[in-house]
Amino acid sequence: MAAPAKNPVSHLPTSIQVRDVDFYYGSKQTLFDVTMDIPRHQATAFIGPSGCGKSTLLRCFNRMNDRVDGAGVRKGSISVEGTDIHSTALDVVQLRRQVGMVFQKSNPFPRSIYENIAYGLRLHGEKRKDYLDHVVEESLRGAALWDEVKDRLEQSAYGLSGGQQQRLCIARAIAVKPQILLMDEPCSALDPIATARVEDLFHQLKETYTLVIVTHNMQQAMRTADFTALFYLGKLVEYDETMALFENPKQKLTDDYVRGRFG
């Protein structure tokens, strides 16, 4: 497999810098010598077949992989907004506040809509009711959900539809003012109408946040991402502007994948 093309975002400010990263789950290596930059206030999609390493890399950015025994980066470095995330001086709780995450399956807390949003702030010691009220509204507006739920804030989040629950989880993630939002297959459990609502939201969110989206859906990457990276067997195959990668891939493996010859 040929080396990936030159860094396509070298002319842009970056939020995440990945250098020569090898990652292991125990004795099994799952990422091989990955180097890439994630541009600030853009949407970057990771695509590739199951098991290719895209979700593993995503979870490296907020050190979610730390929760797996024996998992970790064995070589290379990852920096978020200029800070080495594996520095012994790093506060991992603060990192996860800076780098929010939305998972494949919506996971609202068994609480009211209001408390789902306020929870993270309360966890960080915020008690001012007027401030909590402000952030709850601001976050729900940011997730394009306010008008749908403003009259039922004290009702259970479980009463929302699947698409609304996923937007609630996005609102919960942005309530603590992150700089980066990681999205791990955020629409895979949603119907087409709910998917369209969430995808529309991505375009608004990247005005404020850096987005990194793992998706199996190549059409979704084309609709939502400014840049796309293809991974295969733990290696970064190609990384480019989304339309260039899909319409004029530089690697044969990329061409085969986007044309559906495997995957």
Image: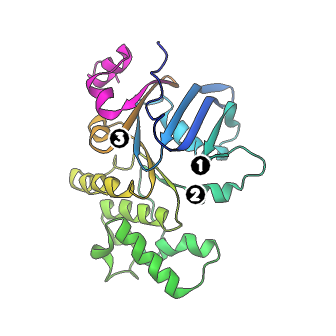
Q: Amino acid at mark 1?
A: Glu
**Relative image position of residue 133 (x, y in whole percent):** 46, 82
Is residue 140 in the magenta section? no
Mark 1 crowd level (few <14, some 14–19, many ≥20, 10 Å Cα): some
Q: Amino acid at mark 2?
A: Gln
Q: Residue at x 31, y 28 (%)?
A: 244
Q: Residue at x 28, y 38 (%)?
A: 222
Residue topped by disc 1: 81
Total number of numbered discs in the rendering: 3
Label placed on residue 98: 2
- Mark 3 or mark 1: name the one nearer the start of the chain: 1
Q: In the rendered image of this protein, does residue 39 appear above or below residue 119?
A: above
Q: Nearer the viewer, residue 243 or 155?
A: 243
Q: Secondary structure at mark 1?
A: loop
Residue 219 in view of the camera: yes
Residues at marks 3 and 1, CA–CA distance in whole angstroms: 19 Å
Q: Amino acid at mark 3?
A: Asp
Residues at marks 3 and 2, CA–CA distance in whole angstroms: 22 Å
Q: Nearer the viewer, residue 47 or 37?
A: 37
**Relative image position of residue 56 (x, y in whole percent):** 54, 37
Res. 141 image quadrant: bottom left
Q: Secondary structure at mark 3?
A: loop
- Mark 3 or mark 2: name the one nearer the start of the chain: 2
**Which segment is the magenta one?**
236-263
